[in-house]
Image: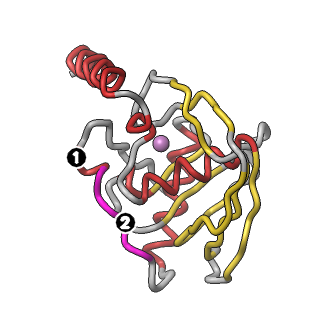
Amino acid sequence: MSLLPILRFPDPRLKTLAAPVRNIDEGIIRLARDMAETMYEAPGIGLAATQVDVHRQVIVIDVSETRDRLLTLINPRIIESDGKQVCEEGCLSVPGIYEKVERAESVVVRYLDLAGQEETIRGDGLLAVCLQHEIEHLSGKVFVEHLSRLKQMRIRAKLDKQAKITA
Ligand code: NI
């Protein structure tokens, strides 16, 4: 297992569209394992392959307080969404930034598990937010893109400053 480096917004590679996984081979299983380790270590509640510069449709999520309910979703698709909620979100690719985003209150997601079985999961509240946030990464979108242009400019400036301090 190994920790994977996480791309930081506004890295243009975060805009890459992830390709569907056709064959769940050793490489995909290793990727999912390394992504889970990276997410727990960060620590975060979700990570998309896009964020570790692998452009395949793989996400990992664990919103449990006990950190022992790992979900690995291959080729996830939202097939139903209902209601509205506003939740303060953060992202491992946008360190230190937390902003309110409006999303569906509940979603149903169809995906393949690591054994290649088709599954569906219904999530509401935080799990629904996390599913929507991670699935969006696979289509090249970062949560700050829901915010006003002015807010996005401020966030870019703040992250630039951070990058200079840590460089
Ligand atoms: Ni994120």
Mark 1 highlights which residue?
Answer: 12
Coordinates of residue 15 in the picture (x, y in percent):
29, 52
Q: Nearer the viewer, residue 81 or 27?
A: 81
Residue at the (52%, 36%) spot, across then down = 42
Q: Which residues are magenta?
A: 15-20
Q: Is residue 104 left or right of residue 90?
A: right
User: Amino acid type of disc 1?
Assistant: Pro
User: Amino acid type of disc 2?
Assistant: Ala
Residue count near mark 1 (Cα–Cα under 10 Å), binned few <14, some 14–19, many ≥20:
few
Residue at the (63%, 44%) spot, across then down = 129
Q: Is residue 51 left or right of residue 120?
A: left
Whole-number angstrom distance, CA of label 1 to CA of label 2: 14 Å
Coordinates of residue 138 in the picture (x, y in percent):
42, 59
Please tell me whether residue 21 is drawn above or below residue 135 in the rendered image. Answer: below
Q: Earlier in the sequence, mark 1 or mark 2?
A: 1
Mark 2 highlights which residue?
Answer: 18
- Magenta residue check for 147: no
Question: Magenta segment, principal secondary structure?
Answer: loop
Which quadrant holds residue 21? bottom left
Disc 1 on helix, strand or loop?
Answer: helix
